Amino acid sequence: MDKDENWFQMVAKEDKYQLDSNRNDGFDMEDVRVIPLSGAGVAEVGDSLRRAELLHAVLELIKIRITFFVGMSAAFGYIIAANDISSGMILPVLGIFLLSCGSAAMNHYQERDTDTLMHRTNKRPLPSGTLTPGSVLALVFAFSIAGSVLLISTGNMMALVFSLLAFLSYNGIYTPLKKITPFAVIPGSLVGSFPVVAGWAAA
C-alpha cells in the first residue's frame, strides 16, 4: 500500500507541475474579452446569410451543373461548325445558356407540387419556401428574354429556333410525359441534342 501511495503522490505532483506550467505561459482567461455584436452587425450578418441562401437557391433553380454543360455543348457545336475558336462564339453561347437556365427554372415551377412529396426533392427552392412561385416565374421570363435578345441581336435566328425547340420539348413534352410513361425518355433524349445544333447554327 505504501508503494501505491507513493506512486499516486508522484503522479499528483507531476499533474500539479503541468497545471502550474500552463498557468505561467502568459495566457489568462481574464485576458479574454467578449466583444458584443451591435444590432447593425447582427443585421449585416443576417443579410449576408440571406444573400448567400438566395444565391444558392438560384443556382439550384437553374440546375447550374446541367446548364453549364449545355453551354459547353453549344460551344462545342459552334467550334465544330466554324472550325475555329473565336470571341464571336461568346454571345450566342451565352444566349443559349440563358435560355437553358429559363427552361430549368420553369421545370422547378412545373414540379413544385410533386417536389414537396419526395424526400429527395422537398428541399428544393420552391418546396422549402426559399423562393416563391412568383419570383421563380419572374426568373424564368428574365433568363428566357435575356437569352432570346442576345441571340436576336447577334443575328442567330436559327440558334434561337433550336433553343426554343429545346425549351418546348423539355418543358412542354418531356416534363408532363415523364409522370405518365417511361417512354418520355425518347423526347427527353432529343432535348440533349438541341444545344449542340444551336451552337452549330450560331457559327
Image (cartoon, helix red, strand yellow):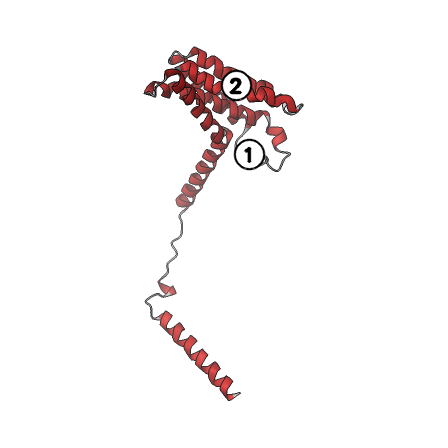
Q: Nearer the viewer, residue 29 or 87?
A: 87
Q: Nearer the viewer, residue 141 or 183?
A: 183
Pointer 2: what residue?
167
Q: Residue at x 49, y 29 (%)?
A: 66
Is residue 84 something that shows in the picture? yes
Residue 110 percent coordinates (x, y): 59, 24
- The disc labelled 2 sits on which kind of residue? Phe
Q: Quadrant of residue 127?
A: top right
**Label 2 neighbourhood size at 10 Å, few (<14), some (14-19), many (20+)?**
many
- The disc labelled 1 sits on which kind of residue? Arg
Pointer 1: what residue?
124
Q: Residue at x 42, y 22 (%)?
A: 76
Q: Quadrant of residue 157?
A: top left
- Mark 2 vs mark 1, CA separation in Å: 21 Å
For the residue labelled by badge 2, is the local secondary structure a helix, a strand or a loop?
helix
Q: Residue lying farthest bottom?
A: 2
